[in-house]
Image (spheres, rainbow, N blue to C red):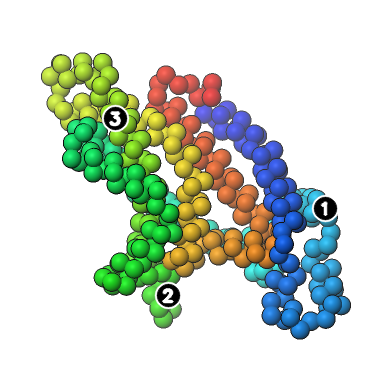
Amino acid sequence: MAHLVARRALLAVPVLLVVTFGVFAIAAASPFDPVKAYAGTAALGADQETLDRLRDNLGVDRPFAARWWEWLTSAVTGDLGQSSVLRQPVADAIGERIVWSTLLCAVAFAVAILLGTLLGVLAARRPGSLLDRTVTSLAYSLEAAPVFWIALLAVWLFALQLDVLPAGGLTDTGSEHVTAGQVARHLILPAGVLAVSQLPWFTLYVRQGVGDALAEDPVRGARARGLGERTVLLGHALRSGLLPVLTLIGSRVPELITGALLVETVFSWPGIAAATVEAATAVDFPLLAALTTLATAAVLAGNLLADLLYGLTDPRVKLSEM
């Protein structure tokens, strides 16, 4: 296992280098003017000399390759630079927001996996039944629904019509302290919406995997030996049927991150979504590079986690050969 982790870590280095270089190249070609974004409304009445001086102070006229190399060498030492749009160090800007984004993604992903496994197993027990058709149809419908549409629908139903959950934010309006109870209550809608957007994939994969496992000879042999249906389902079919789901975990991380950005925006969740949007529109090179590196690292970590789980679960797979 240690060799696999070390090998993947070494392979991640050139990937991160290429990704960050690409971020600086794309940002340099962006039509947005970082100087006007930094100055805000003050740029409307500023003369050209002031704008040129500000442009020189921000260093936006330098070649993007030079800015990338300067940022990279500083990032290696732990200095991620200064965010021009947020007016604070990039490390502080990310540190203040990453906790809430991680909480949102972790809760949503856990709910999607657990609920998707349950629904998939129930549907696979009796293929073609009313329950199977209902779960499958619902999964395909949710699979095609945009996450922002689900989020807006959830706000309309639970916050505006039923008035049982807050429409957004982290705490109640006027609250001076962040409490666990308030965070949990405000987390229900965004985490639920994000979980629903990931749910169809796990449901359909589990249904297919468990259904195929139930038709295999080992499971038939277990039934022939007189084992109970619950033992056959949970002890034999489920373990075999969950193997494809483990590979799905890594591939869903990019979609999870993208969905989280949209959900955070709709529900005003204080994660990295707002910082990402502001960094993109203001062409904030250091913040853009740091956020992209973070997202890329999360995707690579998700793929590594999926491979580790697969290797530990399936005795036929050797981690040393992966």
Q: Residue at x 73, y 67 (%)?
A: 34
Q: Nearer the viewer, mark 2 or mark 1?
A: 1
Q: Is residue 24 above or below residue 303?
A: below
- Residues at marks 3 and 2, CA–CA distance in whole angstroms: 47 Å
Residue 125 or residue 141, whichever sits in front = 141
> Dots 2 and 1: beta carbons under 8 Å?
no
Label 3 environment density (alpha carbons within 10 Å; few <14, some 14–19, many ≥20) = many
Q: Amino acid at mark 3?
A: Val
Q: Which residue is mark 3?
A: 210
Lower position in the chain sequence, tag 3 or tag 2: 2
Residue 134 x, y percent position in the rendering: 23, 44
Q: Secondary structure at mark 1?
A: helix
Seen as rendered, the residue at the extreme bottom is: 45
Residue beneath the point at 40% across and 21% down? 315
Quadrant assignment, res 159: bottom left
Q: Residue 208, image x and y in percent?
A: 32, 31
Label 1 crowd bin: few (<14), some (14–19), many (20+), radius 10 Å: few
Mark 2 element type: loop
Circle on res. 177: 2
Q: CA distance from mark 1 to mark 3?
A: 54 Å
Q: Amino acid at mark 2?
A: His
Q: Nearer the viewer, mark 1 or mark 3?
A: 3
Q: Can residue 261 be seen in the rendering of this structure?
A: yes
Find residue 217 and report its horizontal and vertical position in percent. 26, 15
Q: CA distance from mark 2 to mark 1?
A: 44 Å
Q: Which residue is mark 1?
A: 66
